[in-house]
Amino acid sequence: MSGDGGGSLRLFRNTEFVALASTAFARSQAYSTVLIALALYADLFGTSGTVEGLFGTVFAIMQLVVVLPLGRYIDTGNSKRFLLVGLAINVAVFVGFAMVQTVEHVLVVRVLQGLGASVLWLTGGAVTGEISPDDSRGLWLGTYNQVGAFSSLAGDLVGGYLLYVYGFKWTYAVLIAITTLAMVAVFFFLRDNPGGRADPEDSTGLETYRTLLDRTAIRALVLFRVAFSFGKMAVIIFVPIYAKTGGFGINEFVVGGIMAGGKLTKSLTQGWIGDLTDRLGNRYYFVLAGALVYAVGTAMIPLAEFAGALFPAVTLGVMGGLLLPPAFFALFAAYAVLGVADSLRLPASMALFVEEGEHFEAVAGSLSLRSIAWKFGQILGPVTVGIVWDVTSVFVAFGVAAGMLVLSAAVFAVLYAVEPAPEGVDVAAGD
């Protein structure tokens, strides 16, 4: 698995990368399609902004509970089995969503989805980082995320179309088929026990987390993730709901088209930017730039209220005359900016966490901290912004989200890169 030459496409000649990429494809398409389905559930059950925020919060609470012990098991156990289990959980999630009849049912299934998504994301990222060559880790992680971004784009368009034309049950049947194919790829193509190189006594106990957090660089990354996730998760949850229920005349297929704006720019640029971080270094500048650009995109979202002054309504000659109202173009542009921001941030952020974890033979442990930091913002962000929206306006709600994104950039700029990477550090054993 040489890291020399080629680019993103050459990685698809590597069957292990294909297996890992298939899990990212299945996970991201499911996540994206379910976000559109949540907008339909919100419309169907007439939910408030606070309840809609809970759609994101309960998902994150489950992830918060499992991410730390899961990181330890991945560092010390057989990651291939975790990937298979995570995919099986997702199949159960789709069956559950097909059967929901109340908003309480939706919340319960979102909890289960949080478990499956956490297993797949943390395991897939850790294994990709560990089996990739050192000189092309950014390329591997960037391309791995690029597959997820492309799949998310497919979830927006194909998932939105399926929901619009065929409804919930056939849409979830398609997701079950895709997830099953990913299970087959992992079972046959991925080596047994990828990663899992550390002894249980030496990796990812509480002492390891304490040692990691003694690093100012790790603390900067963790605090950045908390503040950034507050803003971003509010955007992820509320943009499809805002598009569907905001009185713009947007159907679920067009909602998918809006979300595709960000996924398109992300899928086109993330692998290239990941490779750029390998060549230029100074990854923290990419993280900082990504946060600031994301704040700009977030502030653009409520400008959809005034889109009629700039954009005309357009009717396409498909699906019996598909209407694209002015708000579609404003929201599509905002999401396109958000996609560029993610491409700047994601490969660099993941690579920085992997590098920090390697100093202590605890890559998954470091990624666990990355993930758990996200959960605090993911828990607080959607429900807080939902409450703000209920008592004020859409402008104030997304303004709060954008403000948290700017704060995340400020914290990161102050704290990061104030101490050198450790050399020859031994981590104390035990919990």
Image (cartoon, rainbow, N blue to C red):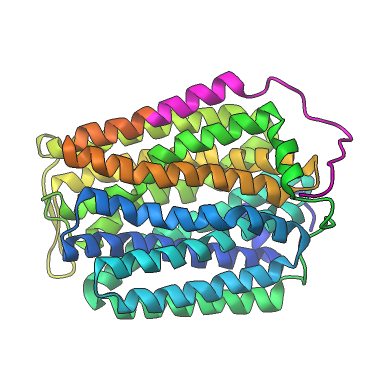
Q: Hey, which residue is sitting farthest front in the picture? A: 431
Query: Is residue 409 found inside the magenta-colored segment of the image?
Result: yes
Residue 134: percent from left, percent from top: 78, 46
Residue 312: percent from left, percent from top: 11, 44
Q: In terms of depth relative to the viewer, which is nearer, 99 or 10? A: 99
Picture residue at 49% right of the left edge, 22% below the top: 410
Judge left or right: residue 410 versus residue 102.
Answer: right
Q: In terms of depth relative to the viewer, which is nearer, 86 or 339? A: 86
Residue 372, placed above or below residue 282: below
Within the image, what quadrant is residue 302 found in?
top left
Q: What range of the chain is rendered magenta?
A: 404-431
Residue 18: percent from left, percent from top: 64, 66
Picture residue at 62% right of the left edge, 74% below the top: 84
Q: In terms of depth relative to the viewer, which is nearer, 400 or 267? A: 400
Residue 417: percent from left, percent from top: 67, 23
Residue 240 in view, yes or no: no
Position of the N terminus by quadrant: bottom right
